[in-house]
Image: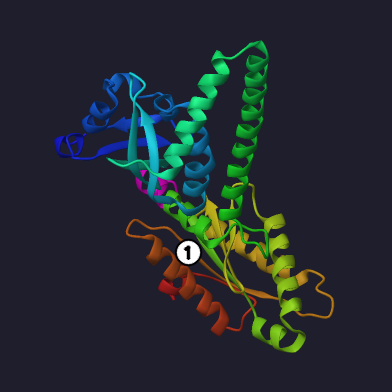
């Protein structure tokens, strides 16, 4: 860790999605009274009281999973000698070295806020329960069991929130945000390990006329049915997502030009031969295979240009970007 960051005038730590501390600066260690090797590899919740853990699970985890960042959250950590340290907490969730991490910065706050008073009140109440009679101890055990149940429920809710954040509600496919994350991961794998992949951009032919003729509810039905067909035809390793409107995208891992064209043709022919009732549904597809100089933007642009060539070439066809270059 750079000395500037290690001795910065604010605390810094990085945790995995599960909450395990991966790095921490000296300012944060001094703030909490720990040595570096005492916290690296430990769960960040080891620096929290029981009530703080509840608050962390209830607000921080769901928010960071849903929005990818937390801004100016008031929070309290606990030092080695059990003293409270009120802070202003900022966090951002990002991908580094192919793994999701949460980077956090904390600034010590000199004033307590209302929810800290509630936490202190909860802590005092728990201490009173521990010191009470046997009946109170049984009640405390009941509260702990209830806490465990609620903790599991929160974990489940967090998973559901993550699913919702990455899912297109109309079609049930992955959404544009999820696709962009996977594109970056795929590009990283290509740059580090030369693992080739291809991208397909799929667009419904004459979709506007379907909406204009039959109405948007029918258009939505066509989108949903097409999404299901694309998902059925795809391989288990493929990433199928709705990019927007009537446009879909497919990431094909371990797939170069010839195989990408074959898979795209399978998508196209399956759509063309499917039973759409009174509607005539076909798709045009543009394909591109990653090359050394590609960025997320350039790869998508090459596939999109190939899609345009399929459209202008008569629709219901597949065009690979490399074919355009050779021609």
Left or right side of 189 for 87: left
Q: Residue 258: percent from the left, percent from the top?
A: 54, 59
Whether residue 37 is visible to the viewer of this picture, yes or no, is: yes
Q: Identify which residue is drawn at 41% across, 52% down.
A: 187
Magenta segment's dominant SS is helix
Q: Which residue is mark 1?
A: 288
Q: Residue furthest right?
A: 277
Q: Residue 106: percent from the left, percent from the top?
A: 30, 41
Q: Nearer the viewer, residue 250 or 146?
A: 146
Q: Residue 228: percent from the left, percent from the top?
A: 72, 60
Q: Identify which residue is drawn at 53% across, 34% down.
A: 54
Q: Is residue 107 above or below residue 320?
A: above
Specify the quadrant that holds the N terminus. top left
Q: Identify which residue is drawn at 35% across, 41% down.
A: 112
Left or right side of 259 for 316: right
Would you say residue 106 sits in the magenta stretch? no
Q: Nearer the viewer, residue 90 or 260?
A: 90
Disc 1 packing (10 Å; few <14; some 14–19; many ≥20): many
Which portion, as a residue range, is magenta? Answer: 187-195
Specify the quadrant that holds the C terminus. bottom left
Quarter where residue 250 is shown: bottom right
Would you say residue 194 sits in the magenta stretch? yes
Left or right side of 19 for 319: right
Determine whether the residue tagged by mark 1 lies in a helix, strand or loop: strand
């Amino acid at each position: 860790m750079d000395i500037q960051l290690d001795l910065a005038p604010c605390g810094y730590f990085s945790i995995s999605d599960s909450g395990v501390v991966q790095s921490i600066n000296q300012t944060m260690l001094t703030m909490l009274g720990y040595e570096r090797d005492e916290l690296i590899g430990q769960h960040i919740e080891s620096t929290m009281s029981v009530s703080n853990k509840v608050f962390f699970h209830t607000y921080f985890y769901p928010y960071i999973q849903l929005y990818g960042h937390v801004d100016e959250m008031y929070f309290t950590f606990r030092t080695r000698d059990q003293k409270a340290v009120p802070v202003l907490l900022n966090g951002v969730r990002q991908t580094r070295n192919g793994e999701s991490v949460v980077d956090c910065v904390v600034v010590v706050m000199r004033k307590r806020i209302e929810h800290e008073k509630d936490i202190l009140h909860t802590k005092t109440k728990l201490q009173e329960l521990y010191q009470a009679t046997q009946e109170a101890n049984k009640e405390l055990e009941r509260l702990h069991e209830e806490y465990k149940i609620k903790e599991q429920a929160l974990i489940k809710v967090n998973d559901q929130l993550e699913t919702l954040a990455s899912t297109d509600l109309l079609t049930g496919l992955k959404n544009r945000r999820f696709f962009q994350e996977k594109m970056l991961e795929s590009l990283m794998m290509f740059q580090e390990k030369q693992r080739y992949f291809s991208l397909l951009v799929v667009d419904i032919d004459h979709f506007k006329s379907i909406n204009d003729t039959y109405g948007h509810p029918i258009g939505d039905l066509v989108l949903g049915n097409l999404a299901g067909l694309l998902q059925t035809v795809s391989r288990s390793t493929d990433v199928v997502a709705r990019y927007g409107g009537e446009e879909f995208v497919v990431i094909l891992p371990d797939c170069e030009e010839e195989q990408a064209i074959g898979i795209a043709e399978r998508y196209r022919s399956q759509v063309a031969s499917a039973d759409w009732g009174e509607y005539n549904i076909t798709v045009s597809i543009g394909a591109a295979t990653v090359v050394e100089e590609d960025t997320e933007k350039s790869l998508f642009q090459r596939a999109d240009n190939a899609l345009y060539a399929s459209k202008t070439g008569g629709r219901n066809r597949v065009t690979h970007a490399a074919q355009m270059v050779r021609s």
